[in-house]
Amino acid sequence: MSASLANPGLALFVLCAVMVACTAAVYRIARLGNPMTAPWAAARGALQLAAVSLVLAAALGRLWSSFLVLAVMFGAAAFTAGRRAKAGRSAAWLSVALASGVGVVVPLMLVSGVVPLEGVAIVPIGGIVLGGAMTATALAAKRGLDAIDQRWGEVEAGLSLGLSVRDARMEVIGPAASDALLPGLDQTRTVGLVTLPGAFVGVLLATGSAVQAGAVQILVLVGLLLAQTCSVAVAIELVARGVVNRAGAHRVY
């Protein structure tokens, strides 16, 4: 089954072209926006995947180049998380939050021997964990900063009661930023019932073994929970201490 799935060729190209054309048609009929939005997105995605495929084909054969790929991915994730948080130059500190999540989970997987020390295993698993940590970090930082802006009166009230700046900020940051963990928790709770995530489907198609696919997926999900929790904890701490902030916003006293 896996040998015939989505093989590059004319049939794949025609099918994708038809689906993109149908998407563009729905855009126009339903007046969802520029009908060329979907074709441009599809073309960009195809080019990016082609480039990434060529790079990975060369990189995964060597351990050092696999770690180099992960380093580049980490840089892109840190930049993306900072941009989404809208924290200006201070957003660079969110790389610490990212590192705290990925730096705990990936070494644990490698030291345990569950994930082999090979590029073909490290890059996909590391990329999934990094992507989840990036989303959680960005969401936690953004919501934490938004909470400070919107509920500054409560922060001042906490200060008037004798709380430290960090503790007063955390009173409003914590509940807001904890929502960043909900997507990962929901995915773990509903896996197999509502969704079949990519890791499960990928292993199932590659090996045909549902048991092995389930084992890989639970490893990924639990790793994501730990990585996201660590990253969010560090992110809100950085926001509470004013290390990550917005220009012109309320500063730490």
Image: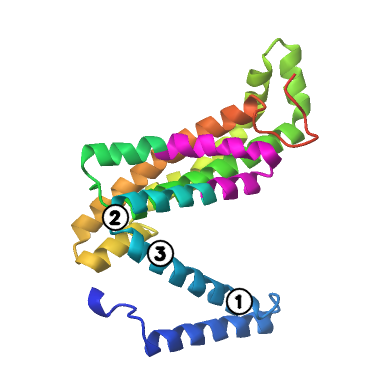
Element carrying mark 3: helix
Q: Where's the N terminus, which quadrant?
A: bottom left
Residue 165 forms part of the magenta stretch? no
N-terminal label among 2 and 1: 1
Q: CA distance from mark 2 to mark 1?
A: 34 Å
The magenta region covers 77-102
The residue that disc 1 covers is: 40
* Circle 2 crowding by C-alpha within 10 Å: few under 14, some 14–19, many from 20: few
162 left or right, relative to 43: right
Q: CA distance from mark 2 to mark 3?
A: 12 Å
The residue that disc 3 covers is: 55
Residue 141 in sight here: yes
| Residue 131 place in picture, x, y as percent | 47, 50
Question: Considering depth in this image, is 58 or 176 the residue closer to the camera?
Answer: 58
Task: Give the residue type at disc 2.
Answer: Arg
Task: Give the residue type at disc 1.
Answer: Trp
Secondary structure predominantly adopted by residues drawn in magenta: helix
Residue 1 in sight here: no
**Quarter-of-image position of residue 175:** top right
| Residue 11 place in picture, x, y as percent | 38, 89
Q: Is residue 62 above or below residue 44?
A: above
Residue drawn at point x = 71 percent, y = 79 percent: 31
Q: Residue furthest right?
A: 248
N-terminal label among 2 and 3: 3
* Camera-side mark, 3 or 1: 3
Disc sitting over residue 32 in the figure: none
The residue that disc 2 covers is: 62
Question: Considering depth in this image, is 243 or 151 the residue closer to the camera?
Answer: 243
| Residue 103 place in picture, x, y as percent | 40, 36
